[in-house]
Amino acid sequence: MTEPRRERSTEAFFGRRRGKPLTELQSERMRDLLPRLRLDLDTAPPSDLKTLFAAHVDLVRLEIGFGGGEHLLHRIEENPRTGFIGVEPFVNGMAKFLRAVAETPGDRIRVYEDDATRVLDWLPDASIDHIDLLYPDPWPKPRHFKRRFVNPGNLDRFARVLKPGGAFNFASDIDTYVDWTLGHCDLHPAFEWLATRPTDWHTPYAGWPGTRYEEKAIREGRKPCYLRFRRA
């Protein structure tokens, strides 16, 4: 009997889920640490999202598609009064991050290893101070543009969960995706592009640590762009 085709409605914005086999330590972290840090989307979210964290926090920041977690780990260390939610569906990326976060206090981090739209739909209104979408899969072929994470529906989701005045940062080295994002945000009434000078979108964010992916892009001659938007 032929197996039914897997429904990809929850995978519309990302590709493969696994890479090379995990190491024994990575597997251990996925087994033991992930359940402790994972958001339970089957329960109602707290009315005050800051109570998700064991530590006292003043702000809550969401990073979608954190890869191996280099940027997320840097921001956790840099912002001791901020709680972080990290979403990464790629198993190897999540495993790498969990191995690293096991060596740091985990009382200000919650994670989810599947579709970020599920997290966005679960979050309360006006509960997030900052969203990072850094080097998302560009889906460069026109027939795949519908799989780009920046689209009217997801911008509506961002607008709902961001607090007024909250930040949305988008970084990419793919010109067409940068143009795509600027165009979609320009058409959305909730987002204001914060560039004031021609050089702004090539200026890294404050405290930007860089990523391995970015280093590769620069070596290959692609110029990173850093877009900053504010929730109107």
Image (cartoon, rainbow, N blue to C red):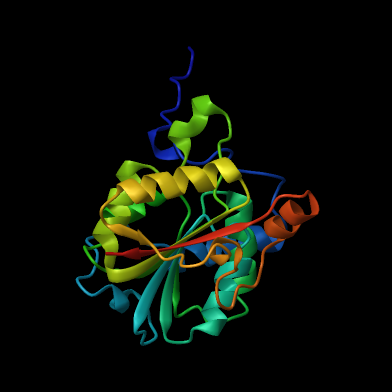
Residue 104 rendering spot, x and y as whole percentages: 59, 81
Could you tell me which residue is drawn at 63 percent across and 51 percent down?
Answer: 173
Q: Is residue 42 visible?
A: no
Residue 82 vs 141, above or below: the answer is below
Which residue is depicted at the point 47% across and 19% down? 3
- Of residue 72 and residue 226, the one placed in the foreground of this image is 226
Residue 148 in the figure: left or right of residue 29: left
Instruction: Identify which residue is drawn at 39% across, 85% down.
Output: 55
Q: Is residue 50 above or below residue 192?
A: below
Give the left or right position of residue 45, taking residue 174 as reference: left
The x, y position of residue 10, in whole percent, is 40, 39
Single out the residue that lies furthest toward the top. Answer: 1
How many discs mark residues in the rendered view?
0
- Front-most of residues 135 and 66: 135
Where does residue 56 sit, x and y in percent of width and height?
36, 87
**Residue at 30 percent of width and 71 percent of height:** 165
Q: Is residue 177 above or below residue 33?
A: above
Q: Is residue 14 visible?
A: yes
Q: Nearer the viewer, residue 82 or 196?
A: 196
Question: Quick check: 33 above or below 81?
Answer: above
Q: Quadrant of the C terminus?
A: bottom left
Q: Residue 100, how many percent across, how many down?
A: 64, 71
